[in-house]
Amino acid sequence: MHPPSPKRPLASEHDHRACRTAIRAGSRTFYAASWLLPASVRRPAFALYAFCRLSDDAVDLEDGKADALARLSQRLARAYQGTPLDHPADRAFADFVREHQIPRELPEALLEGLAWDCEGRRFATIEDLHAYAARVAGAVGAMMTLMMGVRDPHALARACDLGVAMQLTNIARDVGEDARLGRIYLPLEWLAEAGLDPQAFLASPTPSPALADVIRRLLDEADRLYARAREGIARLPLACRPAILAASAIYAEIGREVERGGFDSVTKRARVDGRRKLALLARSGLEATSLARGRAEPALAETAFLVEAAARLHVATPAPLSLAERLQRVLAIFERLERFERFEEIGK
């Protein structure tokens, strides 16, 4: 892949505001955590997530899913050609992939995961579920890492771990909601071990101790991956660590809410309230400065192809910040938190 050319941006200020609005409505967890990102990183992050949101909605909301996927593939091709469709997310995403040298294999993996959704694919084992989560969430984590200027394979592997963990949390939270749409993402092997018949459950979604145990197992696996991901966050630029740490903490807290609800994700939908999110944001800002790199674990077998694609270009690692620079970053984080809190109060 060639170095990015100094072409004029395709997206306007209006386009970037539209991307921010889409994220505020579509992903409150990411929107909250994004306030801890430096402005130079926050804007392309909104562009990435707006395109991901557009892709997900296009498949979920349109009746002709095969046609929707074909159109998404065309939109992706045009973004990489530098001739995006006339839509804010398309223009912003076209700028994003060019400026940050995003290998096309990463967004293509996302579209492949959405295609699996359209097929109504089910997953026999936890490894099969990892493969799905790698595509719909791990690919996004890899793209976020590249956006931060990091192509270290170990950091990318941990970013994919975090994406997979978040997707497993989503699945654990949405068991009932998915079932009412005729979908089941829980590993069929685990359901069989618990004595649960998938078709019977879909016909009448009902909470049970056996189902609760399956959901608990899924959250245990998510927690294992959240723990692995922390080592990768320490490999990110210091200014970016608080936001990623906060997103990880807030998603993990969703799992804790599921647990507090007796692992009943059929009649309840776990949520993290605004006050708790603010506390996690503040804690993440403090913890981010003391994160340390640990032992580099290999990538999950199911995410290795993403790591290989993303690490293909080498980018030099920036010099470490001085103590004074780190303290300035922490102060800037708390200023952004104060602005976010005021903004949330206005929006109530």
Image (tube, grey):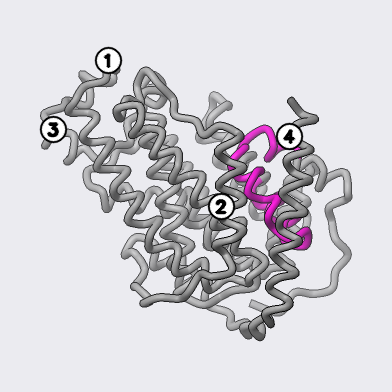
Residue identified by numbered label 1: 203
Other residues around mark 3 within 10 Å, as few (<14) / some (14–19) / many (≥20): some
Q: Nearer the viewer, residue 137 or 226?
A: 226
Residue identified by numbered label 3: 194
* Residue ranking furthest to the top: 204
Residue identified by numbered label 2: 246
Q: Residue at x 26, y 20 (%)?
A: 207
Q: Nearer the viewer, mark 3 or mark 1?
A: 3
Q: Are marks 4 and 3 in contact (CB under 8 Å)?
A: no
Gap between marks 4 and 1, in whole Å? Answer: 40 Å
Under tag 4, what secondary structure? helix
Q: Which residues are magenta?
A: 21-49
Mark sitting earlier along the chain (2/4): 2
Under tag 2, what secondary structure? helix
Gap between marks 4 and 3, in whole Å? Answer: 43 Å
Other residues around mark 4 within 10 Å, as few (<14) / some (14–19) / many (≥20): few
Gap between marks 2 and 3, in whole Å? Answer: 34 Å
| Residue 22 drawn in magenta | yes
Q: Residue at x 38, y 67 (%)?
A: 304
Q: Is residue 213 above or below residue 135?
A: above
The image's mark for residue 344 is 4
Q: Position of residue 202 (x, y in %)?
A: 28, 20
Q: Position of residue 199 (x, y in %)?
A: 22, 22
